[in-house]
Image: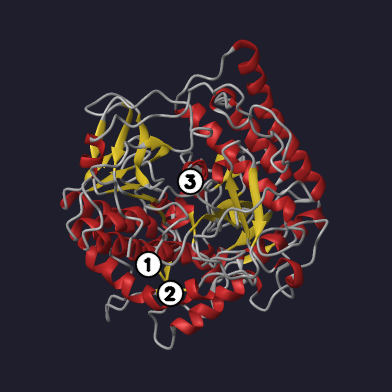
Amino acid sequence: MSRPTGRPSAAAPAPRAATPATALRAPAPGWAIEADVVVVGSGVAGLTVALRCAAAGARVTVVTKARLDDGSTRWAQGGIAAALGEGDTPEQHLDDTLVAGAGLCDERAVRTLVTEGPDAVRRLIATGARFDADDDTGEILLTREGGHHRRRIAHAGGDATGAEISRALVEAVRAAGIDTVENALVLDLLKDGAGRTAGVTLHVMGEGRRDGVGAVRAGAVVLATGGMGQIFSATTNPAVSTGDGVALALRAGAEVSDLEFVQFHPTVLWLGPEAEGQQPLVSEAVRGEGAHLVDADGVRFMRGQHELAELAPRDIVAKGIMRRMRERGAEHMYLDARHFGAEMWERRFPTILAACRTHGIDPVTEPIPVAPAAHYASGGVRTDLRGRTTVPGLYACGEVACTGVHGANRLASNSLLEGLVFAERIAEDITEGIAEGIAEDITEGIAAGAEPVGAAGRTEGPGERTGPSDPHATDTPDALGSPAGAPLLASEARYEIQHIMTHGAGVLRSAESLARAADRLDRVHDDAAAQLRRDGKTAEPGVETWEATNLHLVARVLVAAALRREETRGCHWREDRPERDDAVWRRHLLVTLRADGALDVRSTDSEAFPPPTTPRAETESRP
């Protein structure tokens, strides 16, 4: 039985970059390294895969966009959810996850998460992670967060759980001598002649032994690139979260799902109406320890909206805050935890306390102004339970992936656990393939042919057609898809895209706002395409233009899916379709990118994912 980890044999053609019609414009690779596995990303998902594969004897290279210890994981405050406490069970964790997911969780995936989660956390502790524990008994201290009926959130450093997990994994990776490439933006997937994964192209920022555009040749590529929060003006995500993994996967022909379900964290520190970029998060654990959401008059408005009040699932709390803001004509609400006292704030939430005080707010003596902001992508690159995508040899894990665990809304603190559990399953799948001798040395395949070819920047042949600019259209020809007609967007387009998405596809959406967003996204591309046709010029290849182009692609997919889903469910809130419609919409939307640049959008038959070998659908036109 073959596995996606298989690599080209000596007779195989040399790798080529992505799909010729969709790859990013970039110089040809000027250097190359070889590995069995290349992991893109250095959060809990990526580093866990790297450690497990290396321990099994695989040659692993980790590629990360910033420093090794600067992955998205380190920003996680609250903790990691697992049934570790007395009286808690995986079945109870499963029930809470399914409720939060609003009818779209894949129950098999959730059961995998909650049953394998406790032991995965214990292995993380064995790797070196130190969680907060009782001074007398040594038992791990657990807290509650929104949507959980039990205390099952393990935390570290009070509110610095992600930083501690990152520290432990980075130290382990360095101790294991795993090859790393830092400050590197991944560009596109390399494939062999049979369409199987053969590595990635990437651009290393700065000067050194590896700089500029290069390639890592490997038969297994694991995307662990984190989120895409930077498509919105205000987000809890770091500046590097530009959807690079989702965009790469789309260009490589992979399927993505549930991208319309972007979770807006209810309690982000409000810094003013003009605040942009990464915003400070006020962890759900603050509410788990007893903080109250109030309006300017001190009224606890979440009472009566849900049995758990402030500890309802995040989508419900975010909607409750937005409704109250509308009712009161306010720009924010308040989180009141003055009753904690100084000692508890300093011991339990030192990071949040410091962030608030930096911005002139003292939670010990005054309520914290909060408002929802983009936080987490519940959807992403679709995978099976072993992390395999619809492209052989390409895996995805963590926030970039859509395993089916989160459904329409992620349960608090399930993200770190998902990254951990599915990273271990990916590593098992990859190393089993290597152990069975299925994967042959990729250098033999490369030796039989030429260097990897970067498709971007090549001109199209006579008679080739280009794709539609309308993300929902089927036949409208323009210059979206072909190499000659697929421009890179200028770096300034990033801010225009963020503005479009914030106002058209943010917390509140409607058919009108989404259609307007789709049209404006079209114009961003069409203006660049027109200049390319007229003057033969496009934005210069570079990190900022590649990021802007990735953001644009991911934004197109999100808007197309959000426009298609004509209901309100989980963290997808359609003002014009305020009710949940299980009869029609208890199913997933699957999206692929055609070689001509059009989007294929189709729905599954139920809330369960079909096997990831499903053939592509016919292109859907705009509803």
**Percent x, y for residue 17?**
41, 35
Element marked by disc 3? helix
In this view, 243 is above or below 294: above
Q: What amino acid is labelled 3 in the image?
A: Ala
Disc 3 target residue: 249
Check the picture and name the quadrant holding the N terminus. bottom left
Residue 152 in view of the camera: no
Residue 435 in view of the camera: yes
The disc at residue 421 is 1
In the rendered structure, are the residues bearing label 3 and label 2 in contact, judged by CB atoms less than 8 Å apart?
no
Residue drawn at x 32%, y 46% is 69
In the rendered structure, are the residues bearing label 1 and label 2 in contact, judged by CB atoms less than 8 Å apart?
yes
Q: Earlier in the sequence, mark 1 or mark 2?
A: 2
The residue nearer to you, when weighing 372 against 502, is 502
Quarter of the image holding residue 359?
Answer: top right
Residue drawn at x 63%, y 29% is 465
Element marked by disc 1? helix
Q: What amino acid is labelled 1 in the image?
A: Val
Element marked by disc 2? helix
**Percent x, y for residue 205?**
35, 28
The disc at residue 112 is 2
Residue drawn at x 32%, y 67% is 131
Q: How is the image coloured?
A: secondary structure
Q: Earlier in the sequence, mark 3 or mark 1?
A: 3
Residue lying at the far top of the rendered structure: 535
- As drawn, is 212 to the left or to the right of 231? left
